[in-house]
Image (spheres, rainbow, N blue to C red):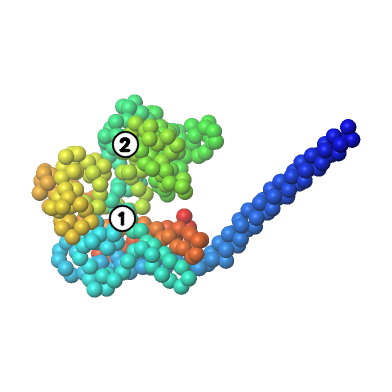
């Protein structure tokens, strides 16, 4: 019996020691994780200023590339804005200055930065769209007829200044939005960002995002369950709030072109085929950009529509979004800017700059 008691005591002691070791190990692991996080935060804080200047350097590089692109004298097509140019990552003709410039992995000081330039004039400006075009867009997306009227009326209410006592049938003003959870007020003004459409009565996430992909930042992308959306194309694929107001026929996609007067889905596809050249791939040397809006007659646009199209279409772009990915060591930060300018302008000006 005595031996058994001693054996039991030894077993208990071993278990207690193991438990203490496990607790201390867990505490040490937690402390190490906490220190790792603190070190990363400290490193990010220390590099904050450098990362911002890398971001601003990327924006300046984008401005330089766009200015130089307007100075190329290779031919009439170089006086257009098209997808084979360097700003778009294309492989087309450049001048001797642009030949040695890269958009990716530029070394500067202790860090690197990469630049992505996106043409904003490839979409329709939602702040300029009229009732007819919005209705046509919704119909083309196969939105239920009853919902079309609700969305159109509600959007006009959202965008236009509030007129007390006047609300179009099926529209919505602040009184309606204040009944929601959480409540909010109608904008009664121009949209600052296209995602404001999600606040408009009748606009669902499925309709807005379509089957867009949802990236990690959660600001620009789809929604949970986007793959189940009945709309292959969403409103975000068609509209923007940042553009010069004219759609560039050399960069717009079929989803946008098919909505314009005189266009069908077939003629929109023919525009892209014409732009892509013989190899059928846009962004390569054999691309054939349109030199004028009148050349749309070559793909079957009726002559009666060409003058109307020239009012809100062009072959150049004047508004661009620039995203810069800056990195120092293992610390990365993205910055976004909108710049405007274009052919005939002395420079491209930065109208906004912010961290992403």
Is residue 97 shown left or right of residue 171? Answer: left
The residue tagged 1 is: 119
- Chain-order first, disc 1 or disc 2: 1
The residue tagged 2 is: 232
Residue 299 image point, x, y percent: 12, 46
Residue at the right extreme?
A: 2
- Marking on residue 139: none
**Circle 1 residues within 10 Å: few <14, some 14–19, many ≥20:** many
Q: Is residue 55 above or below residue 11?
A: below
Q: Residue at x 29, y 34 (%)?
A: 141
Q: Is residue 47 above or below residue 214?
A: below
Q: Residue at x 15, y 64 (%)?
A: 76
**Which marked residue is nearer to the observer: mark 1 or mark 2?**
2
Is residue 171 shown left or right of residue 244? Answer: right
Q: Quadrant of the N terminus?
A: top right
Q: Are marks 1 and 2 in contact (CB under 8 Å)?
A: no
Residue 277 image point, x, y percent: 15, 53
Query: Can the viewer see residue 338 in this picture?
Result: no
**Circle 2 residues within 10 Å: few <14, some 14–19, many ≥20:** some
């Amino acid at each position: 019996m005595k031996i058994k008691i001693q054996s039991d005591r030894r077993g208990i002691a071993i278990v207690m020691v193991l438990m203490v070791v496990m607790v201390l190990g867990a505490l040490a692991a937690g402390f190490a994780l906490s220190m790792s996080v603190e070190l990363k935060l400290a490193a990010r804080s220390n590099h904050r200023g450098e990362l911002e200047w890398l971001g601003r350097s990327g924006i300046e590089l984008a401005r330089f590339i766009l200015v130089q692109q307007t100075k190329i004298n290779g031919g009439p097509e170089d006086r257009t804005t098209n997808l084979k140019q360097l700003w778009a990552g294309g492989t087309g003709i450049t001048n001797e200055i642009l030949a040695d410039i890269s958009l990716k992995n530029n070394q500067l000081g202790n860090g690197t930065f990469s630049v992505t330039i996106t043409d904003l004039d490839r979409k329709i400006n939602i702040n300029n769209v009229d009732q007819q075009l919005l209705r046509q867009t919704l119909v083309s997306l196969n939105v239920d007829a009853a919902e079309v009227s609700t969305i159109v009326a509600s959007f006009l209410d959202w965008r236009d200044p509030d007129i007390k006592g006047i609300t179009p049938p099926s529209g919505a003003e602040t009184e309606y939005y204040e009944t929601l959870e959480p409540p909010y007020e109608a904008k009664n003004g121009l949209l600052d960002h296209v995602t404001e459409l999600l606040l408009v009565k009748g606009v669902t996430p499925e309709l807005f995002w379509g089957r867009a992909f949802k990236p990690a930042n959660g600001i620009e992308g789809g929604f949970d369950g986007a793959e189940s959306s009945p709309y292959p194309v969403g409103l975000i694929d068609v509209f923007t709030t940042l553009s010069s107001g004219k759609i560039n026929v050399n960069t717009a996609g079929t989803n946008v072109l098919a909505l314009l007067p005189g266009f069908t889905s077939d003629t929109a596809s023919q525009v892209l085929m014409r732009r892509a050249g013989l190899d059928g791939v846009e962004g390569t040397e054999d691309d054939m950009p349109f030199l004028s809006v009148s050349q749309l007659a070559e793909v079957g646009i009726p002559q009666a529509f060409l003058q109307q199209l020239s009012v809100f279409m062009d072959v150049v772009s004047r508004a661009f979004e620039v995203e810069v990915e800056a990195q120092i060591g293992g610390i990365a930060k993205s910055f976004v800017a909108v710049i405007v300018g274009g052919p005939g302008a002395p420079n491209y000006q930065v109208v906004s700059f912010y961290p992403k």
